[in-house]
Amino acid sequence: MPMPAAKTPAEPRREATYADIEALPEHVVGEIIDGELVVSPRPRSRHARTATIMGSDLSTAFDRKPNGPDRPGGWWVLFEPELHFGKQVLVPDVAGWCHERLPDLLDVPYFTLAPDWVCEVISPQSGRRDRIQKARIYAQNGVQWFWLVDPLQHVIEVLERQGEHWRLVDTWGGDDAAAKMPPFDAIGLELGRWWLPLSNDSGT
């Protein structure tokens, strides 16, 4: 009776490197998450609208020196900064650093200092990765505040780091005209500006 053929051992997966990101075309976003190259297309209009208006509102009020109750200041707010945590390379939709931890914003291609706050605008394609892998990496590397923003459900989850885990502080959403969401709770934010209408199916 013939002996069964021996199975060929599977080759170990090659870990992605930064050269893989550099080789990508400009119209995509590349990240390295747990050794895997993750390539995402540019966001669609619903996602882009939420990230743009949210970032603009936060920049107007907080991306400045402290100078008053309606514009508290004290932050650097950036769209899609590239973050390097060892071999992990992440690109959140929006992130912010307190002036106390980052007094000067230098002209650099990426950051190794963890932001104080990151925001991921989730989509059906990215939601699981944002909630599990990226959330874990952010917590392990010292990000204090994490927002998960769902532009389809019009919901914002605000999480605070406790050790290497996240605690849900609260949820906001809908057309709240004065949402005070930490760490930007010094003023109320008009959430209705952040969303495309739910009936606009072409932009989901």
Image (spheres, helix red, strand yellow):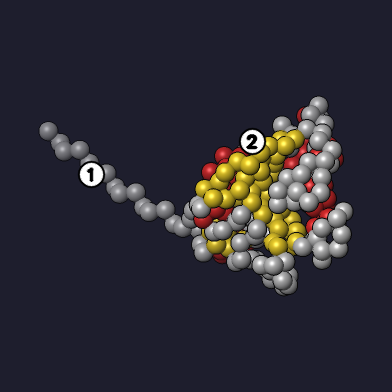
Q: Going from the N terminus, do you reach mark 2 or mark 1 first?
A: 1
Q: Amino acid at mark 2?
A: Pro
Q: Give left or right: position of 74 versus 157.
A: right
Crowd tier of the residue under label 1, counting other residues whose Cα lies within 10 Å: few below 14, some 14–19, many 20 or above: few
Q: Residue at x 51, y 62 (%)?
A: 87
- Identify whether 157 is placed above or below 106: above
Q: Give left or right: position of 121 versus 141.
A: right
- Identify whether 191 is placed above or below 110: above
- Identify whether 66 is placed above or below 190: below
Residue 73 falls in image quadrant: bottom right
Give residue 22's mark. Answer: none
Q: Position of residue 192 (x, y in %)?
A: 83, 37
Q: Position of residue 140 (x, y in %)?
A: 51, 55
Residue 104 falls in image quadrant: bottom right
Mark 2 lies on residue: 124
Crowd tier of the residue under label 2, counting other residues whose Cα lies within 10 Å: few below 14, some 14–19, many 20 or above: few
Report helix, strand or loop for mark 2: loop
Q: Nearer the viewer, residue 16 or 62?
A: 62
Mark 1 lies on residue: 6
The quarter of the rendered structure image containing the N terminus is top left
**CB under 8 Å between discs 2 and 1:** no
Residue farthest to the top?
Answer: 199
Q: Position of residue 198 (x, y in %)?
A: 79, 29
Q: Nearer the viewer, residue 184 or 52?
A: 184
Q: Give left or right: position of 191 versus 109.
A: right
Q: Position of residue 66 (x, y in %)?
A: 82, 63
Observer-side mark, 2 or 1, equals: 2
Q: Nearer the viewer, residue 6 or 130?
A: 130
Q: Give left or right: position of 113 versus 65.
A: left
